[in-house]
């Protein structure tokens, strides 16, 4: 477990480094200008949805897949393919619906920037929104690999996708401008799917197609959606941080969508990489302990994971605050990103310190709740967090401005769920240990 977690963390650490370098290169190529503001706005909804799918589908599907695999390998493979076909079709319908209503959605979020900004943002988002079915298929493939205790291949695909994304942007930016970002986003997702798809299961498509509209398949789909829906809602609530950041940043002068996006990516990316490997490997192990009713050992493992994750998160935040400004000034200044732009970016750091702690540890607090089957409680908590954060942020914006609204909103959004999850976990432990 430790070896796999360490290797996954190392690969994702490299990916995070590539992504940070990519953000620097993108800033230097395009500058803190309206075109990049528009792309960051356009990618908000596709990124939220792809992140939600990648972050929740495995947690919902892996326990179900393991149950089917225990019956027989053949039944597990047919079950995998049936749900893949059904849910990828459903996700395509969702993409079409978002495409139809894209203008009203963007108007609600970024209407303060004007009609031309909304039109450009809509043109880019319409292409990226159709990557959702491919993200879903890729995440299904990842779950299958995890069920076989193969944790490395998915991380390698993620690494290849990040490298491809950066290369496409650098190569095509002179020719296609900001549209190179759109091409890179779509291409990276397709490349990851090509790498990670379990081609040995292609033969089960023929077995699955005649069964997908059967009564038993519909029952399986409904049971899965019942387990997945609370996680989707919870994760959408958690990912509401992007909406808070970009919506309130759009009410600030030109360039602040870029500045706040860079700052949030720097903090969330670096703190996330410190715990992602632990999350990936820890959850299947925790499921085994909970299903085996080994709550005493589960309690110890969860405490260690939270302590380890919290320590790493605080450590990396200190590094960001005290060391990264030197490298940011050195690497980011140049091209269309001036020294003044860099100083504005660094000045935003204090607004993201407290929320970054929540970004680093939140999943380590949420996974035990998922393992014990209390997803609905987690959903209620996170929906409550969204309502509180948006309401308070709106008030703070009136009196103290957009940056304060972003910081306070993120703080409430992250820690409402964390505190509530800890209370639920301890109540469940007390009940079972007694």
Image (cartoon, grey):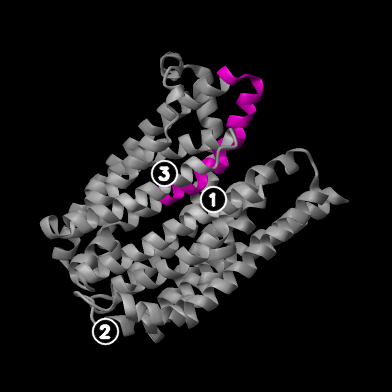
Contact check, label 1 and label 2, Cβ < 8 Å: no
Residue at screen point 37% across, 83% down: 401
Choose between 299 and 112: the one closer to the eye. Answer: 299
Q: Is residue 270 left or right of residue 4?
A: left
Location of residue 336 in the rendering, given as x and y in whole percent from the top left corner: 19, 75
318 displayed left or right of 258:
right
* Residue, disc 2: 339
The answer to whether residue 375 shows anywhere in this view is no
- Of labels 3 and 2, earlier in sequence is 3
Crowdedness of circle 3 by 10 Å Cα count: few (<14), some, many (20+)? many
Q: What mark, if any, has residue 157 been given in the picture?
A: 3
Q: Secondary structure at mark 1?
A: helix
Q: Residues within 10 Å of mark 1 (few under 14, many from 20)?
A: many
Q: Is residue 68 magenta?
A: yes
* 2 relative position to 414: left or right: right
Q: Main secondary structure of the magenta part?
A: helix
Q: Is residue 71 shown above or below 172?
A: above
Q: Which percent across, then down, holds residue 77?
A: 52, 22
């Amino acid at each position: 477990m430790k070896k796999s977690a360490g290797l996954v963390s190392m690969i994702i650490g490299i990916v995070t480094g590539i992504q940070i370098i990519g953000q620097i290169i993108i800033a230097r190529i395009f500058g803190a200008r309206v075109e990049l503001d528009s792309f960051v706005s356009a990618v908000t909804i596709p990124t939220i949805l792809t992140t939600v799918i990648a972050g929740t589908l495995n947690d919902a599907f892996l326990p179900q897949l393991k149950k089917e695999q225990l019956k027989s390998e053949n039944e597990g493979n047919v079950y995998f393919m049936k749900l893949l076909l059904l849910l990828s079709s459903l996700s395509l319908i969702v993409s079409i619906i978002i495409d139809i209503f894209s203008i009203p959605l963007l108007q609600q979020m970024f209407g303060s920037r004007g009609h031309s900004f909304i039109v450009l943002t809509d043109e880019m988002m319409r292409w990226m929104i159709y990557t959702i079915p491919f993200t879903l298929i890729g995440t299904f493939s990842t779950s299958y690999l995890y069920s076989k205790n193969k944790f490395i291949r998915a991380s390698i695909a993620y690494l290849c996708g990040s490298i491809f994304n950066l290369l496409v942007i650098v190569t095509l930016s002179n020719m296609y401008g900001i549209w190179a970002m759109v091409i890179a986003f779509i291409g990276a997702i397709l490349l990851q799917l090509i790498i990670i798809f379990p081609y040995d299961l292609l033969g089960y498509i023929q077995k699955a197609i005649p069964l997908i509209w059967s009564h038993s398949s519909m029952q399986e789909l409904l049971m899965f959606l019942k387990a997945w829906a609370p996680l989707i809602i919870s994760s959408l609530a958690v990912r509401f941080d992007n909406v808070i950041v970009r919506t309130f940043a759009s009410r600030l002068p030109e360039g602040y969508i870029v500045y706040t996006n860079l700052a949030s990516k720097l903090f969330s990316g670096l703190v996330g990489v410190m715990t992602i490997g632990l999350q990936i490997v820890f959850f299947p192990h925790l499921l085994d302990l909970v299903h085996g009713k080994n709550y005493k050992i589960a309690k110890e493992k969860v405490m260690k994971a939270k302590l380890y994750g919290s320590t790493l998160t605080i450590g990396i935040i200190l590094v960001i605050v005290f060391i990264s400004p030197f490298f940011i000034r050195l690497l980011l200044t140049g091209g269309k990103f001036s020294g003044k732009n860099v100083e504005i970016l660094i000045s935003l750091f204090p607004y993201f310190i407290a929320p970054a702690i929540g970004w680093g540890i939140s999943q380590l607090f949420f996974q035990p709740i998922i393992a014990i089957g209390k997803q609905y409680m987690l959903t209620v908590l996170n929906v409550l967090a969204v309502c509180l954060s948006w309401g308070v942020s709106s008030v703070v914006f009136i009196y103290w401005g957009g940056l304060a609204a972003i910081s306070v909103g993120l703080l409430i959004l992250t820690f409402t769920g964390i505190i509530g999850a800890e209370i639920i976990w301890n109540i469940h432990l007390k009940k079972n240990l007694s």
